[in-house]
Image: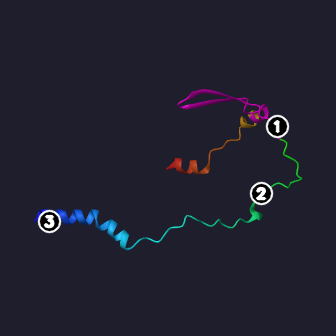
Amino acid sequence: MISYLVGLVAFLLFALGPLTQWLAPAPPSSSYAPRPFLNASHLALDDADAPAPDCAPDAYAVHIYSRKPLVLYLEGFLTEEERAHMLEERWVPSSLVRLFSLS
């Protein structure tokens, strides 16, 4: 009796799946997907007669000290004025930090 039950389960698993796909095939799927409408007013394009932006060349050099973990040194990344600005004493703790440090 158990052998009939095992045979029925095997039949259901292996034969019933392909049989149902053959009797009731799925509709053909289309790989075509229409492109969404592109609103040209949302694009930030330069005019054809506009001059190219004038950017100064990069003045820093990259040194790789280690690849795993990746450790880089950017020599000359900040100018003297940028360094002076970063060293100004303008930092104050956030009010949220003070609020949560009391509890």
Say whether marks 1 and 2 touch (CB < 8 Å): no
Q: CA distance from mark 1 to mark 3?
A: 83 Å
Q: What residue type is disc 1 on?
A: Ala
Label 3 near label 2: C-beta < 8 Å? no
| Residue at 56% across, 51% down | 99
Element at label 1 = loop
Q: Which residues are magenta?
A: 55-82
Q: Residues within 10 Å of mark 2 (few under 14, many from 20)?
A: few
> Which residue was labeled with disc 1?
56
Q: Position of residue 43 (x, y in %)?
A: 75, 59
To which residue does mark 3 refer?
4
Give the residue type at disc 2. Answer: Ala
Q: Nearer the viewer, mark 2 or mark 3?
A: 3
Q: Secondary structure at mark 2?
A: loop
Q: Along the polypeptide, which appears first: circle 2 or circle 3?
A: 3
| Magenta span includes 71 | yes
Between residues 46 and 66, which one lies in front from this camera angle? Answer: 46
First of labels 1, 3 by sequence position = 3
Category of crowding for the residue at label 1, using alpha-carbon neighbours closer than 10 angstroms: few (below 14), some (14–19), many (at least 20): few
Q: Which residue is mark 2?
A: 44
- Answer with left or right where residue 49 lies relative to residue 62: right
Q: Residue furthest left?
A: 1
Residue 45 vs residue 10, the one in the foreground? 10
Residue 37's place in the image compared with 79, above or below, is below
Residue positioned 73% across, 66% down in the render: 39
Q: In x, y percent, where is residue 61?
A: 71, 29
Q: Secondary structure at mark 3?
A: helix
